[in-house]
Image: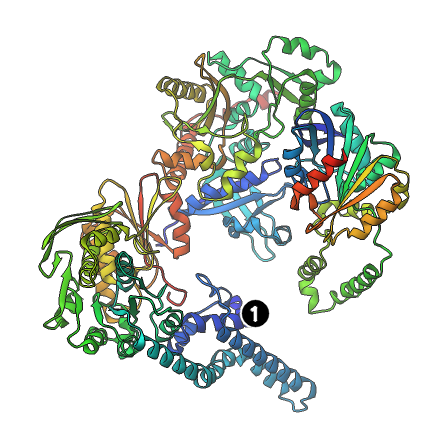
Amino acid sequence: MNIMKKNVAVIFGGRSAEHDVSVITAHTPIIQSLISVGEFEVWPVYISKDGSWYSDQTMNDIAYFKREDFQTCLKRQKKVQILFDDGLKLVWPGILSKTIIHINVVFPAMHGTFGEDGSLMGLLRMANVPFVGCDLFASAVAMDKVLTKQVIAAEGIPVVPYVWFLKSDWKKNRNFLPEKAAKLKWPLFVKPVHLGSSIAISKVKDQTELENAIEVAFHYDDKVLVEESVQNLIEVTLPIIGNEELQLGAIERPLNKTEFFDFSDKYLSGNKKGKGANNMYSEIPANIDAEFVKQVENLGRRTYRALGCSGIARIDFLIESVSKQVYVNEVNTLPGSLYHHNWKRVGVSGVELVKRLIVLAEERFKSRSGITYVFDSDILKKIS
Amino acid sequence: MIRNWLSRYSFRYPRAIVYMLQASEYNLRDYFAWYHNVKNFANVEQRKQFVKTAKGTLLLVIAWIFIFFIVCFSSLILWFGTFPLKYILAAITLLVAPYLLAYGITVPLFVIRIFIQLPVEYFLIKQARRRLKNHKAVKIGVAGSFGKTTMREILRTVLAEGKNAVAPPHSYNTPLGISQFVKKLSGREEVLIFELGEYYPGDVRKLCNLVQPDIGVITGINEAHLQKFKELGRTAKTIYELADYLQGKPIYVNGESEIALENARPGHTIYSRKGIENWKVKNEKSDLNGTLFTLTGNGELSLKSGLLGLHQIGPLLVAFHISSALGLSHEQIKKGIEKTRPFEHRLEPKIDGTGVITLDDTYNGNPDGVKAAVEFLGSLKAHRRFYVTPGLVEMGSHTEKVHRDIGRNLARACIEKVVLIKNSVTHYIEQGLKEEKYGGEILWFDNALVAFAALPYLTVKGDIVLLQNDWPDQYQ
Amino acid sequence: MKVIVKNLATEYKDEGVGKVLLFLHGWQDNLHSFDSLAVSLSSDYRIIRLDLPGFGGTEAPKEVWELNDYAEFVEDFISKLGINVYALIGHSFGGRIAIKGNATGRIKMDKMVLIGSAGISKSNTFRSSILKILAKIGGLLLYIPPFIFWRSELRKKIYVLIGSDYLNAGALKETFLKIIKEDLTTAAEEIKTPTLLIWGENDTETPVSDGRKFSRLIRNSELKTVNGAGHFAHSEKPQEVTNLIRGFL
């Protein structure tokens, strides 16, 4: 039974508003599934809210993070050091000897800032270690809702009309806004462009509300998006995995009371009870016209490719059901809990999902190591 | 190592000791066997928790008083002792204290048993016996190594269509449990159904003397509790104590259980999925929705039950036969059988929000029940099937054979995934699987809790998961 | 809905049309405390509820605040929304803010309702001084082995026993201390607004005797007690409290 197991590091937590959600994603399904596979040695790497890095296998149990004395426990924990030369290594310094674990694959499970925006991916590229999910470029673009729209619109993919501006523009001159927004049809949505969750998103009906909402959005971000709201709206989302060859999950329709996903609805309500996150609040597969299904799947594939996604991503759509227009709204490069409840419906268990994602990570790593990055040059010698 | 050893000095230790006594039903042999197997006393309460019964609480208090005296004693030695060896003496006291407690606790237990429990029990049982003797209801006694609870529930459900029929809830099948139940009877009941539990030779006889049954059902004999009975002959003899008591009164014997059939005597009514007396079964069919069959003999009846598996037909026929004898019409019986549903944790189907179907058979831990469950799972062809088990306990000298058979049956039924818990018996299941050239996948887990936690990540919509048996804390 | 007040993202709810009723919740509570009142009153009034800084969906103040800062915060919130408050309704700690805001003239209102309001200082009662001494002795004991090993756990148990909000206050500990120190006896005397005082008869946090004291201090006030209710009269007996408020308005 004692075959050498692959060391997989699951990185989660982080200095982001979605710290807690990340802890959930890391455990359900990632760590639980990786352990269930039996072929991996799972190393949880936890980044606390203050940015300290820890790794201890007791953290493989989510109960660790639910303890009442969690903060005290964490303080007693020895911090882990990371080595980046030729692969990623976890190092625990000790008095007599230090323990070193060579990580074979990294499974990033950090949502939002620093985790999902490409920062962590940059670090892992530097370390030359295979990692699961989208690479730096796709992550960075998907993190910016405006950039996403700009890239996919250039590929001819329909997006809802919008305007955007920076905090500095706003500070200089508040009056430019009515001009910019004049072309849009009210009511409008106001969103901070980088925030992954729907915290601080508002729907506004008049000028005062708009100004207050922009102020709120700028409280969380330095770039704000104002877009039209879609009438006769059907919201659906589609998870996709794959590098070159894509596999689609089920088209899922969230059934909420509110007009858009509320932060608490999205992450908390579904997890309160029962196993499948979001289960009670979605219709899987969405009961929509066959023609919409076709469009969603087609646009999903095109968006995935246009952004250069790999591993896994989830694409959100807005459907105007009367005029039959399908828009791509945004792209999420680390779907909460990997949308494992959705994959389960199409016959992919949590275990199969993480195994597949790890294979995809290794494949991408291999194909990239075929690319030459270093050139011999005598440029230094030429400098006198 | 050190942590394990120190667990004997933790606050939880006395509670752990009393819990272990309680969970092994104050059987000292089981208790000591368990005690010597435990490495870390901080986590013996895994499946269940200490229950605050009068006896348990009293023992816990005594344990703490004992500890108090030990601490006082060693402190006194240290403070007042003048002899040079006082440190060593104090250290030895502290060292042996946990063991002293573990063994010493049996003394008050013994005292409680002799001076309180036994007299009280004797009185209660005597009283119950008297009440039952005067009670006009028809009393049915159900004995056997397995299937007693299901039989009891079937009888109660079907008979209730025409009679005021009651049975003790849960697994109240000891003299004391039955006595407590008898106290609550109103006197207006028309049928009483009792399970007669057997752990040691003579148990069934004692229960018969208490219950005084008019009708007996022997559900089968197999390796359950073989550890205690040592050989199957003694199990059979114990269970047939019911027949010895009834002498000439109606007795039903499960013909599907080989050993039960071998011991059956002339005049006993044999039942099986094929039929009972001159009633024959045809067109039988069983799936996740229940079981259908047609009964022909003195007329024809098509019956439908919510119970899963063809092996349930035999017991249903017993209910049919007894009900007919007690005067229920075929219409009533048909309605009653329609109402029979899987009992808790006995091949009980559940479907979760993600579309995974679980067959909870965790209370079924005997070879015949397992065989029936595997057969049923094997018949559900349109699904991917998971079979999860830690194996069976107390199989004594038959341990290897019983588990190899399970493995072979699983392979023959072509179950896609077999999930095994690592312990002293499951490798026999693996052997059995290999002997039959099993083509599916075997998944190993360190313990049942880990396996249960992993299942949601292994399954997808439409899968069927059969959970077979669950081990109490005392088995490893 | 969110709005930025004093550079804090502030969560609030705005329901119904009509004269504005502004609700302020208690310590360690949030705007949902008034859910049942909002349902029945929003048919005739515009109900605005907010999460006070540090609670619910509103960010915590970045520095230690005093009661006056909270009153100023509510003042800013009102002007941000551009509303005229017809009646201000405060529960417990929300009542403190209402009294302070009213007395200092920061918050303008036509009517005021206080439900189990805090603000009568307990610092000089016999019970609390005894408790204080015991706490000090207990605190010292906790440094002696073997108790020192369980110090934090025991401390928690003790605070739970005496039912103090102090440990739960978390980052707001200092703010909490500052706020409970401030006695509002003199502030209450300056109030001229018609005021309804609602008290649960079984209130143990702010006993009915506090309510009586307020009714003496506030000139234009009347005290109503709610039978069978405790400190959270508005959520325990919403129907009675709604009727009282409707009658008063």
Number of residues whose C-alpha sits closer than 10 Å to that of mark 1, classed few (under 14), some (14–19) or many (20 or more): few
Q: Nearer the viewer, residue C86 or B101?
A: C86
Pinpoint the chain carrying mark 1: B
Quadrant housing residue A367: top left
Q: Nearer the viewer, residue A255 or B125?
A: B125
Q: How many marks?
A: 1
Residue B167 in the image: above or below residue C232: below
Judge from the rendering whether residue B219 lies leftward or rightward of residue C55; answer left or right: left
Quadrant housing residue A69: bottom right
Position in image of residue A150 (x %, y %): 54, 15
Position in image of residue B75 (x %, y %): 65, 82
Colour convention: rainbow
Q: Is residue A384 visible?
A: no
Q: Is residue A42 visible?
A: yes
Which quarter of the figure is the C terminus of chain B placed in? bottom left
Position in image of residue C45 (x %, y %): 70, 28
Position in image of residue B468 (x %, y %): 31, 56
Residue B437 in the image: above or below residue B85: above
Q: Which residue is mark 1?
A: B10
Q: Residue furthest bottom?
A: B83
Going 14% across and 72% down the picture, which residue do you hit? B263
Q: Amino acid at mark 1?
A: Ser
Judge from the rendering whether residue B191 lies leftward or rightward of residue A232; answer left or right: left
Judge from the rendering whether residue C47 lies leftward or rightward of residue A253; answer left or right: right
Judge from the rendering whether residue C245 lies leftward or rightward of residue B293; answer left or right: right
Mark 1 residue element: loop
Residue B474 in the image: above or below residue B65: above
Q: Nearer the viewer, residue B410 or B440?
A: B410
Q: Nearer the viewer, residue A268 or B254?
A: B254
